[in-house]
């Protein structure tokens, strides 16, 4: 939410003719949201960012000329493709641009930034930056855009993981004072690792959030991500995908369910998403694997099935 500098009333994300290019579908993400806009022109008055940090990216192929108003002062900028604008909470900015362009906008609440990145008792202040080149944040925004455009195949866990890494990056690179985690690095003890892994496996076919997993280990999501990867060699989302594929492989071997049915049963959003991960992890498509299973059951060669 953006707030008028003088009245404190909410104002739209973009003041001027614009079109939202992604369908308005329910999002499983808990801490972050993304919009892809086609903007004819921008006439944003100087406003506060309210309770959200905004990261904007130009995705058009040509640069645009824009006038920034900050604290009552105007400055012209040439915004190039992949340039980012980081607009923190409670900092007053306004933009004017007459060029038609496309942009991505990510919003991350201040509370989520505090909860996701490190611990709740750290003081921080994100600094306004424009324009800035940041390949890491750009890659995260591109991946969030791909996820939303594909109807969120990675679910809550994947979106939460990207949001967490973005939050940690913002605090590390764009805070007025350098922010460091107070939590020690290392691996899970065997009890905690078993608890988390059992929860992942038990709920593999349901929606799992990073916050839920982190609470089992009594950690912030950021520290949980690092510790889980140090303990298992993969991210929670990668572990979940591997387990779902293993479940799907077992079902294809032991049942007559179709590939589409199996995909839904093990937690994938559709058969295409299941098939891509199945082939990546096993080297063959679910259809080829199921065909080999059928041959084995008929008494043919079972080579490569198990």
Image (cartoon, grey):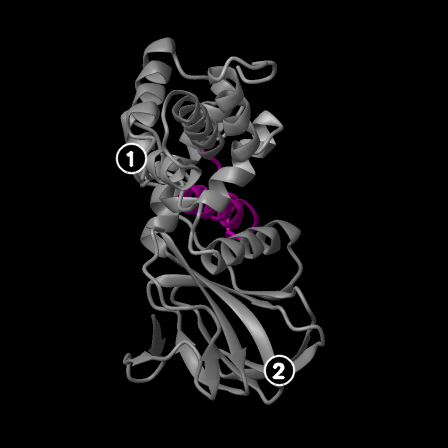
Q: Which residue: 38% across, 36% down?
A: 221
Residue bounds of the magenta highlight: 158-182
| x 49%, y 60%: residue | 149
Location of residue 2 in the rendering, given as x and y in whole percent from the top left corner:
36, 73
In the displayed orientation, state which residue is furthest to the top. Answer: 190
- Write down the residue under mark 2: 66
Mark 2 is surrounded, within 10 Å at the Cα level, by few (under 14), some (14 to 19) or many (20 or more) other residues, namely: some
Provide the major secondary structure of the magenta segment: helix
Decide: is 30 above or below 60. above
Please report whichever mark, 1 or 2, sits nearer to the chain's N-terminal start.
2
Placement of the N terminus among the 4 image quadrants: bottom left
Cα separation, mark 1 vs mark 2, equals: 42 Å
Side of 292 relative to 92 (left or right): right
Q: Residues within 10 Å of mark 1 (few under 14, many from 20)?
A: some
Q: Is residue 88 visible?
A: no
Residue at 49% from the left image edge and 17% from the top image edge: 298
Q: Select label 1 or label 2 by which is in front.
A: 1
Find residue 250 and report its horizontal and vertical position in percent: 41, 21
SS at mark 2 in the image: strand
Relative to 93, 216 lies left or right: left
Q: Is residue 176 above or below residue 100?
A: above
Q: Which residue is mark 1?
A: 212
Q: Nearer the viewer, residue 150 or 263?
A: 263
Secondary structure of the residue carrying tag 1 is: helix
Name the residue rendered at 53%, 56% in the picture: 146
Pick whichever, 238 or 7, lies toward us.
238
């Amino acid at each position: 939410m953006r707030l008028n500098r003088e009245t404190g009333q909410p104002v739209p994300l973009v003041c001027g003719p614009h079109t939202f290019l992604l369908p308005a579908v329910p999002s499983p993400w808990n801490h972050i949201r993304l919009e892809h806009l086609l903007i004819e022109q921008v006439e944003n008055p100087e406003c506060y960012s309210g309770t959200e940090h905004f990261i904007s990216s130009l995705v058009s192929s040509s640069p645009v000329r824009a006038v920034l108003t900050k604290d009552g002062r105007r400055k012209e900028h040439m915004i190039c493709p992949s340039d980012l604008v980081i607009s923190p909470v409670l900092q007053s900015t306004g933009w004017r641009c007459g060029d038609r362009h496309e942009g991505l906008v990510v919003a991350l609440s201040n509370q989520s930034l505090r909860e996701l990145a490190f611990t709740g008792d750290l003081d921080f202040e994100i600094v306004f930056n424009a324009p800035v080149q940041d390949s890491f944040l750009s890659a995260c925004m591109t991946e969030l855009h791909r996820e939303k455009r594909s109807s969120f195949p990675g679910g809550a866990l994947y979106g939460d993981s990207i949001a967490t890494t973005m939050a940690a990056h913002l605090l590390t690179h764009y805070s007025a004072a350098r922010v460091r985690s107070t939590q020690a690095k290392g691996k899970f003890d065997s009890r905690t690792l078993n608890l988390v892994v059992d929860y992942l496996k038990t709920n593999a076919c349901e929606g799992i959030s990073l916050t839920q997993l982190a609470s089992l280990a009594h950690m912030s999501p950021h520290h949980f991500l690092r510790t889980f990867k140090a303990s298992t060699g993969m991210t929670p989302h990668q572990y979940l995908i591997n387990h779902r594929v293993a479940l799907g492989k077992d079902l294809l071997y032991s049942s007559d369910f179709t590939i589409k049915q199996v995909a839904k049963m093990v937690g994938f959003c559709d058969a295409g998403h299941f098939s891509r991960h199945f082939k990546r992890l096993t080297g063959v498509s679910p259809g080829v694997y199921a065909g080999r299973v059928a041959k084995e059951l008929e008494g043919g060669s079972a080579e490569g099935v198990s």
